[in-house]
Image: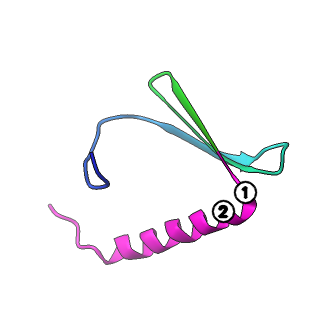
Amino acid sequence: MGINTERDIEANLQIGPTDQGMVRLFISADGMEVPMDFEPDEAEEIAEEIRAAAQAARKVKPRR
C-alpha cells in the first residue's frame, strides 16, 4: 500500500494540544485508535508539509 493506493476505510481525525504541551493527532478507525504526539516545532513542520502537498495537489489534473 502506498500514498496513491485508495482504500474504502472511514477514519476520524482530531487535532489538538495535550495537557503536556504536545500537539496530538488522534486517528480512530474500525475500533482502532492511534494517538500521535508531536513537539510544537514538529507539528509546525508537519503543517508546512500538508500545505505544500495541498499546493502540489491543486496542480494535478484529476483523472476521470
**Residue in front for this viewpoint, 37 or 48:** 37
Q: How is the image coloured?
A: rainbow
Whether residue 42 is in magenta: the answer is: yes
Name the residue carrying label 2.
42
Residues in magenta, as a range? 37-64
Q: In the picture provided, is 42 more to the left or to the right than 60?
A: right
Circle 1: element type: loop
Residue type at mark 1: give it: Glu
Q: Locate residue 31 relative to residue 36 in the image: left or right.
A: left
Residue under the image location 44 percent in, 24 percent down: 30
Q: Position of residue 12 (x, y in %)?
A: 52, 37
The residue depicted at 30 percent of the width and 36 percent of the height is 8
Residue designated by label 1: 39
Q: Is 20 left or right of 43, judged from the image as shown?
A: right
Q: x and y percent of residue 49 in the render?
A: 51, 69
User: What is the x, y in percent for residue 36?
Assistant: 62, 43
Q: Nearer the viewer, residue 51 or 58?
A: 51
Q: Look at the image and tell me in which quarter the C terminus lies.
A: bottom left
Asked if the residue under mark 1 is in contact with the one under mark 2, i.e. CB atoms within 8 Å, the reply is yes
Which mark is drawn over residue 56? none
